[in-house]
Image (cartoon, grey):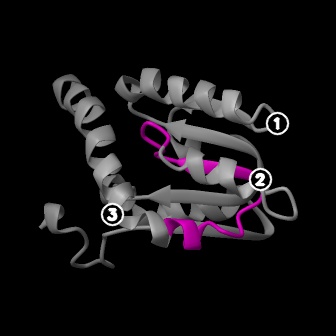
Amino acid sequence: KERSAKTAGIMIPRTMGLIDWQFRLAREELLKGICGSVLDVGCGAGPYLQYYISSRARPGGGVQRAVMLEPNVHLHDRLRKAAADARTQDPGLEVEVRGGFIEELQGESVFDAVVFGNVLCEVPDQGAFLQEVGRLLKPGGRVYFSEHVGVKPHGCFMRR
């Protein structure tokens, strides 16, 4: 498992960089209205931080606070660097890096938005995951996602 996590720590940023390049315009459109306090679940090395910074130039102020939640400790160094770079680009953007899983977060109705991209294929119980998203989302909050996973019983091609 440790070896697999280390490999993922190397490959995920590279793969997600290519995916982000391919889907950049779609993601800009998807995230154009994001604002307030945001939870980014399974954030990898932080590819969505660039969109949070861009959101702040729009009327309404965009993202004020981003909590970057990543369970793979082998991605944390890159994520901390991306968070520091984001703070340098926009000192008004509060960025917090956390390890762990969504079910470990405390509270209810904490975030204005929850973001996850290419995460559901790694989640053992998608229904429970989405319940946790709902628990942490403020009333009227929004969920932004970009996924490649189908609905069970078929699910992700990697699980077949």
Q: Residues within 10 Å of mark 3 (few under 14, many from 20)?
A: few
Q: Which residue lies most toward the top here?
A: 77
Horizontal placement of 26 versus 74: left or right?
Answer: right
User: Which residues make up the magenta segment?
Assistant: 27-46
Residue 11 belongs to magenta span: no
Q: How far apart are marks 3 and 1 (CA)?
A: 29 Å
Decide: is 158 above or below 151: above
Q: Which residue is drawn at 21% across and 78% down?
A: 154
Name which residue type carries label 3. Gln
Foreground pick, 47 / 128: 47
Element type at mark 1 = loop
Name which residue type carries label 1. Gly
Residue 47 visible in the displayed image? yes
- The circle drawn on residue 92 is 1
Q: Do the residues labelled 2 and 1 touch (CB within 8 Å)?
A: yes
Element type at mark 2 = loop
